[in-house]
Amino acid sequence: MALNAAACKILGGGIFTEIRSRLPGVRVAHIEAGRHQLCNLTCVTPISPMQSEVYHVVYWIMSWLTPLKPLLVPFVKRFLGQDRDVAIKQQRGLAFNPRSC
């Protein structure tokens, strides 16, 4: 069963996702599934010319999800790790001083 189909079955409704990005480094995702809602906020904050910190917060209204939080942490870390890997590759590419189009 596909992940979205399984989530729809568990949560009791179709899934609606709205993702908003605000430059320079804010992303808000609001997810609704039936009567359930979840919102996550990811912020990237530069702390030096070569380093940034990533802050990620998730809010939900499903009280039954709270005990599962320790099980969800690895998935969130993997999700954010993908973004980190892209940023590292981008930084390596910028070292060659590419020209803008």
Image (cartoon, rainbow, N blue to C red):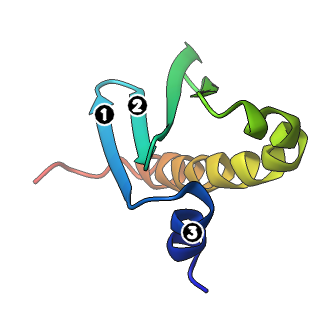
Asked if labels 1 and 3 touch by Cβ distance under 8 angstroms, the answer is no
* Marked residue nearer the N-terminal end (3 or 1): 3
- Badge 3 is on which residue? 9
User: Disc 2 or 1, which lies upstream in sequence?
Assistant: 1
In terms of secondary structure, where does tag 1 sit?
strand
Say above or below: 5 vs 81: below
Residue at 74% in and 54% down: 75
- Label 3: state its secondary structure: helix
Q: Name the disc covering residue 21, or none.
A: 1
Q: Please report contact status of discs 3 and 2: CB closer than 8 Å, yes or no.
A: no
Q: Earlier in the sequence, mark 3 or mark 2?
A: 3
Amino acid type of the residue that numbered disc 2 sits on in the rendered structure: Val
Q: Is residue 8 left or right of residue 76?
A: left
| Front position in the image: 69 or 24 | 69
The N terminus - image quarter: bottom right
Q: How far, Cα to Cα, is label 3 from label 1? A: 29 Å
Q: Position of residue 29 (x, y in %)?
A: 42, 38
Q: Position of residue 38 (x, y in %)?
A: 52, 36
Foreground disc of the pair 3, 2: 3
Tell me the residue at 84%/43% (across/down): 68
Residue 79 versus residue 65: which sits nearer the camera?
A: 65
Mark 3 to mark 2 CA distance (whole Å)? 25 Å
The label nearer to you, 2 versus 1, is 2
In the rendered structure, the answer to whether residue 101 lies left or right of residue 13 reads left
56 sits to left or right of 76 = left
Check if mark 2's residue and mark 1's residue have beta carbons within 8 Å: yes
Find residue 69 and report its image quarter.
top right
Give the side of residue 44 with respect to residue 23, left or right: right
As drawn, the label of residue 28 is: 2
Amino acid beneath label 3 = Lys
Image quadrant where residue 51 sits: top right
